Image (cartoon, rainbow, N blue to C red):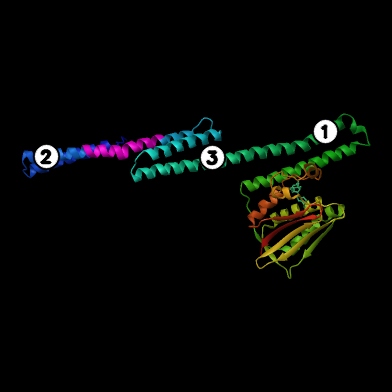
């Protein structure tokens, strides 16, 4: 459909108005002079209005349209992945608009329109910045994943190659190489399991929360990890300070993951014959859980970073112990969904305490 512009419409309306007024004047038997004066007045009014509309509305709108299409063209940029280029272009257009606004003397409505455009492109710029950070994080994450997968795969490959090259017939070492390959395959599985858990978090993990008995739950988890502690002669104990059977609200499967990751770490990073204690205390609305060990501790400078994916205090030591470096980031994620945060207190060569709470 033909869309007429503002001045065109105004012209049509004015012509109709002039014809109507002449018609009415003739009907009322006005003299020719009065009709000419009326028509000329209407014509002059029309010309002044056109100049006014052009200056106050049409021209500013054309300039607005130009800036809006400049901002939009950034969206269609060929280098759609180049955030730097896009951000620089948006900033340039924004600066141009601000500059233009300072010089031009627009009425308040048009000024408001320009200011809205500036606000919109600032928002676009913020969104682009967020996308840029996401992209950097994703690339870093993929790099880390590839690196972490490569290490066990390479070790398995090496063991198998050694066996094929003749070690398979050497009864003194063949089992040793097979065990080595098996250990690395288990590590690979743990890593992939952790990655699957993380990807579930990213896509929005569904929690199934209900009430469960925290004392009974803690006893079961500790029992499952007992042999791990016994292998290192570590004393794994539950200190239950709850006066009676207490229910907490949460997804018991996920909370179990938190307990297992924290207790497993406590055992991993505590030397032989040490102690790992799970302490339950309560406040009016929460149950506090502390996992305390007498292990190697965490240097102060590393504490703020241990919840980052793949961050390890001592890379070689952690890898030797089979850690994926994802455990604590999973713990943090799960606790966030339970409206809880995890706190750490640690002293090198004395031990570490991880604390969190669950809703009663
Ligand atoms: P990992 O799989 O390497 O154990 P985590 O995410 O579970 O990864 O832990 C990150 C790092 O935090 C570990 O590499 C380790 O250096 C440190 N850490 C975690 N728990 C403890 C602990 N109880 N005592 C000492 N260091 C710990």
In the rendering, which numbered label is found on residue 111?
Answer: none
Residue at point 14% right, 42% down?
21
Please say whether residue 320 is visible from this viewpoint.
Answer: yes
Q: How many marks?
A: 3
Q: Quadrant of the C terminus?
A: bottom right
Q: Residues within 10 Å of mark 1 (few under 14, many from 20)?
A: some
User: On the image, which quarter does residue 255 sit in?
Assistant: bottom right
Q: Is residue 54 left or right of residue 173?
A: left
Q: Is residue 212 left or right of residue 118?
A: right
| CB-based contact (under 8 Å), mark 2 and mark 3 | no
Please say whether residue 327 is visible from this viewpoint.
Answer: no
Helix, strand or loop for disc 2: helix
Name the residue tied to disc 2. 37
Measure how far apart labels 2 and 1 are at the Cα level.
104 Å
The answer to which of marks 3 and 1 sits earlier in the sequence is: 3
Residue at point 39% right, 40% down?
102
The answer to which of marks 2 and 3 sits earlier in the sequence is: 2
Q: Which contiguous range is marked in magenta?
A: 47-66
| CB-based contact (under 8 Å), mark 2 and mark 1 | no
Front position among marks 2 and 1: 2
Front position among marks 3 and 1: 3
Q: Residues within 10 Å of mark 2 (few under 14, many from 20)?
A: few
In this view, the residue in front, 122 or 269, is: 122
Q: Residues within 10 Å of mark 3 (few under 14, many from 20)?
A: some
Name the residue tied to disc 1. 158
Give above or below for 259 relative to 188.
below
The answer to which of marks 2 and 1 sits earlier in the sequence is: 2
Measure how far apart labels 3 and 1 are at the Cα level.
45 Å
Name the residue tied to disc 3. 128
């Amino acid at each position: 459909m033909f869309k007429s512009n503002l001045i065109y419409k105004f012209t049509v309306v004015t012509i109709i108005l002039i014809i109507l007024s002449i018609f009415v004047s003739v009907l009322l038997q006005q003299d020719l002079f009065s009709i000419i004066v009326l028509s000329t007045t209407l014509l002059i009014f029309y010309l002044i209005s056109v100049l006014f509309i052009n200056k106050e509305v049409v021209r500013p709108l054309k300039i607005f349209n130009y800036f809006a299409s400049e901002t939009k063209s950034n969206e269609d940029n060929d280098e759609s992945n180049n955030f730097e280029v896009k951000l620089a272009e948006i900033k340039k257009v924004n600066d141009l608009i601000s500059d233009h606004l300072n010089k031009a003397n627009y009425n308040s409505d048009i000024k408001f329109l320009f200011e809205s455009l500036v606000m919109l492109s600032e928002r676009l710029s913020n969104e682009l910045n967020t996308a840029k950070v996401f992209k950097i994080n994703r690339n870093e994450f993929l790099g880390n994943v590839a690196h972490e997968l490569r290490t066990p795969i390479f070790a398995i490959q090496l063991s198998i190659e050694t066996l094929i090259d003749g070690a398979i017939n050497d009864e003194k070492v063949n089992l040793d190489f097979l065990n080595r390959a098996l250990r690395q395959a288990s590590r690979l599985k743990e890593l992939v399991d952790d990655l699957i858990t993380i990807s579930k978090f990213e896509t929005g993990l569904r929690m199934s929360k209900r009430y469960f008995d925290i004392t009974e739950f803690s006893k079961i988890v500790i029992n499952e990890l007992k042999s791990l502690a016994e292998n290192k002669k570590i004393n794994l104990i539950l200190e239950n300070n709850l006066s009676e059977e207490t229910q907490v609200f949460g997804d018991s499967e996920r909370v179990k993951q938190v307990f297992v990751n924290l207790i497993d770490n406590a055992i991993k990073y505590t030397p032989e014959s040490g102690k790992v204690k799970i302490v339950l205390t309560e406040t009016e609305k929460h149950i506090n859980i502390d996992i305390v060990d007498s292990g190697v501790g965490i240097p102060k400078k590393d504490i703020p970073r241990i919840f980052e994916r793949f961050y390890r205090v001592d890379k070689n030591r952690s890898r030797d112990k089979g850690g994926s470096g994802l455990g604590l980031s999973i713990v943090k994620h799960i606790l966030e969904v339970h409206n809880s945060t995890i706190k750490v207190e640690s002293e090198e060569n004395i031990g570490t305490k991880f604390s969190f709470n669950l809703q009663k």
